[in-house]
Amino acid sequence: MTITLANISKNFTSKPLFDKLNLQLDVDSRIGLIGRNGMGKSTLLKMIMGDLEPDEGSVKCTPGMRVSYLSQEPKITPHLSLEEDMRTVFSGLKDLHDEEQTLLQKMGTTPHDSPEYTAIADRLDRVHQALERYDENTIDARIGKILNGLGFSLADHDRKTGDFSGGWQMRINLAKVLLEGAEFILLDEPTNHLDIEAIEWLEDYLKTYPGGLVLVSHDQRFLDEICTEIGELDNRTITVWAGNYTTYVMNKELAVEQQTAAYERQQKELAKQTAFVERFKASASRGTQAKSREKQLEKIERIEMPTTSSTKAMKLSFPPITPSGKEVLSFEKLSKSFGDKHLFNNIEGKLLRQERVFILGANGTGKTTLLQLLMQLEPADSGTVNWGHQVQLGYFSQNQLESLDPEKSAFDTLHDACPKMNHTEVRTLLGRFLLSGDQVFKPAKVLSGGEKSKLALAVLLVSGPNTLILDEPTNHMDIPSKNVLLEAFQAFEGTILCISHDRNLIENLATDIWELVDNKLIMYGGDYHHYKAKRVLMHEVVTGSSKGAASAKMFVDPEPAKAGVTVNRKTIEKQLKAVEKKLSNAEKDIAAIETQMADPAIQSDYAALTATTEQLAEKQDRLKELQDQWDSLTAQLG
């Protein structure tokens, strides 16, 4: 089964978007579409679906092949419950069963040796194939699995889809696309509005999806985990690169360097030959030779200078900041509810100078509200917030773009924020934030959402704060822009408190993770890898402690001496016994493998020895994880 795009051309308001674009997708394709905003990623998906016609060329799909499409606009039936909406995916079942009965009745009254009987049998076979694809016996289980994976609770199943927020309605659309189980699925920004746990679940689901995938995403980690090809849209066509996004970046960088070198060599040789022609074309003795070389020069196919520059660029630098005191922020017994919705109860914590803390948690747990309470933009129900000595705050909210003067240019906006910067410094910094050319002199109102975000963050960084409070700073940004922002934050010498679901940003920047779970704040005391190792265990502890200590703060600290935990002791003791049992089993497994490796028959068999060595390494890694869990639990028990 294939999708073939042949010689596709498309113009919008006389501006060419595609020019003779060609692409073939097989049912095992897993391709990520990338490119700057306006390059036509969403347009290409709409053409594959048949929602948009090309001006020239053709889009052909294998007859009978099903294609499902997740667009960026939520489409729901507001009067249906969530579960009723899921079951609309299978609305064709009744028609198929009715047709099956009709065909069976016709077969009973039609001569077996007639052409009509053969046609009925062929149609019945196709109906049975369609029924098999629906897999009726697993419908309930599939609905439950997908809704749970995307973060819906059992109580949500009876809620009207119109009562969900826009972000959750996008999850409803995604769930329906996954339930359809089509041979091809097209996903336009599927991780938008998903928290990290839902993104990770979706990754695992798509890794084993038995069909073709075409993804548009600005999530680098997601593209790395899912895609085996990257389709780069640029210069009105598409270039397909083998491998995931990280492999694409390396190969693209190498290709740009090679093409640049080849261009420079050719230019040098062309100049040399042109000089020869100019010097001797009027010569009686060497004129013939010069004319011959001139004809050769005309036939040479010119190598173009790469339009994409190398990703290696100068480092960002910002005005020096005034250091804050050691303790930047402390808050105690902080609580907040909205009506019957309790976000958190009696949570407390501290933020120290030069820490880079990321606040995680499922959507709706109160991450943005917590920042607003800390910034004193929203009143707390109870508790205190104290900012430290000489703390100079820079705050980036999800509505930060509204603070930009729509009539002022990017250049004037940045220069006004830091008048000490000269013309060249302003242009250079804007360029590092991928704002260049005429773009910098256009009014902010005509910039895209991602461009406005970059401008607002550049203004924030040059204004001289020593503490950044950031709420989803990478929203609306493509991957190159996100990487520029990561570099900017790495160059920042102050303190950062940030909400984000961008795992690449978190993994490369975070020194600590805070997580809102079940009305509590877990402080993991370590980076993103530490958080991932501890997350499941701590969620179990939090859930187990909720009955007896609903207002407890929670810590997981890699240094036991710093731990200050108030949790249900019986729950932790129960967890500790379970971990000790797993530790004992892991040690026995390692001992058995080591005995096996001492067997001469294994040692003489390279393949068997390699497999056994890898198995031993996996068991040893698992033992280390269990030992870390044991250390953490024993520290909490004191």
Image (tube, grey):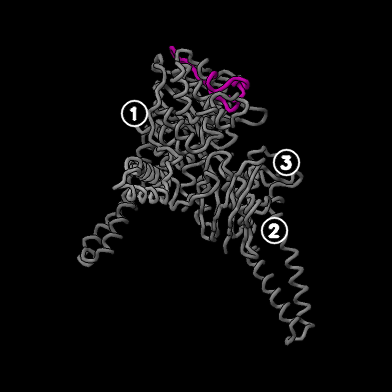
Q: Quadrant of residue 315?
A: top left
Residue at figure coordinates x 38%, y 51% from the top left: 296
Element on which disc 3 rests: helix
Direction from residue 314 to residue 236 in the image, left or right: right
Highlighted range, magenta: 387-413
Q: Gap in Å between the C-alphas at discs 3 and 1?
A: 50 Å
Query: Which quadrant of the figure contains the N terminus?
Result: bottom right
Residue type, mark 2 in image: Phe
Circle 1 residue: 561
User: What is the number of callouts on the image?
Assistant: 3
Mark 1: give few (<14), some (14-19) or many (20+) Cα within 10 Å.
few
Direction from residue 33 to residue 592 in the image, left or right: left
Residue type, mark 1 in image: Ala
Residue at figure coordinates x 36%, y 51% from the top left: 292
Residue at figure coordinates x 56%, y 52% from the top left: 21
Circle 2 residue: 90
Circle 3 residue: 162
Magenta residue check for 400 = yes
**Residue 272 % position (x, y):** 32, 42
Q: Gap in Å between the C-alphas at discs 2 and 1?
A: 57 Å
Residue at figure coordinates x 62%, y 61% from the top left: 61
* Residues under numbered marks 2 and 3 in contact, where contact means CB atoms less than 8 Å apart: no
**Residue 182 % position (x, y):** 61, 58
- Comparing 183 with 551, the one in front is 183
Judge whether residue 381 can be spotted in this image: no
| Disc on the earlier residue, 3 or 1 | 3
